Image (cartoon, rainbow, N blue to C red):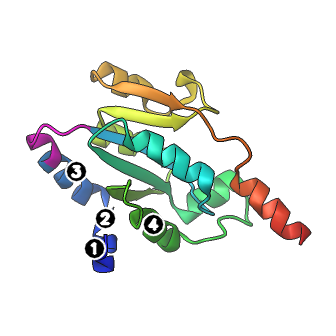
Amino acid sequence: MNRADLIPTKIFTLPQLLQKTAQWRIHHKKVAFTNGVFDILHQGHIFSLSQAAREADYLIVGLNADASVKRLKGNDRPVNDEASRSLLLASLLIVDAVVLFEEDTPLTLIKALLPDVLVKGGDYTIEQIAGAPDIIANGGRVVINPLLDGFSTTGIIAQAKKS
């Protein structure tokens, strides 16, 4: 994509995203959803997002808002604020939509969107994945993708503090 002005158009509020997913579904397109903090984007994130994008025609990324990240990861996080993280994710060709959520889990988002495929990384079990029962009950699939060893935001931060 050489139209950088289109990048912000991939960042949605939930009401906007509900309209967009309805348009996609009119055309019988499948929607995948994954979520995370994506604080310092690294190769492991790209691998995970690429795997998730293969599961459907469109990929939505639920992004923990700054307040949620602080509750989950501590006061030193996020390193990059939600606007920066949203913009970075939206700039990726494999990501079709980014939506922020304030809660600690994306359960409300998942229940509202009811994606065809819910994707999480291999450090989760199906019982630990927020929204998994809702997706399965709606006829969708839950996919647990493998993690790429050796890549983590926590590890990157620890390494930077050593320097």
Mark 1, residue position: 6
Secondary structure of residue under mark 4: helix
Q: Is 107 on the left or on the right of 78, as rendered? A: left
Residue to which mark 4 is pinned: 86
Q: Are marks 1 and 2 in contact (CB under 8 Å)?
A: yes
Position of 1 with respect to 91 (left or right) is: left
Q: Secondary structure at mark 1?
A: helix
Q: Position of residue 162 (x, y in %)?
A: 91, 67
The disc at residue 93 is none
**Does the segment drawn in magenta span residue 27?**
yes
Amino acid carrying label 4: it is Ser
Q: x, y (%) of residue 55?
A: 36, 35
The residue furthest front is 2
Q: CA distance from mark 3 to mark 2?
A: 13 Å
Give whichever of discs 3 and 4 has the lower sequence position.
3
Q: Is residue 159 left or right of residue 87?
A: right
Around disc 4, counting alpha carbons within 10 Å, would you say few (fewer than 14), some (14 to 19), or many (20 or more)? many
Mark 2, other Cα within 10 Å: few <14 / some 14–19 / many ≥20: some
- Asked whether residue 12 is in view, the answer is no
Q: Quadrant of residue 68?
A: bottom right
Residue drawn 15% across the image and 41% down it: 25
Residue holding disc 3: 18
Disc 2 element: helix
Q: Which residue is mark 2?
A: 10
Residue positioned 70% across, 50% down in the render: 151
Name the kind of residue labelled 1 in the image: Leu
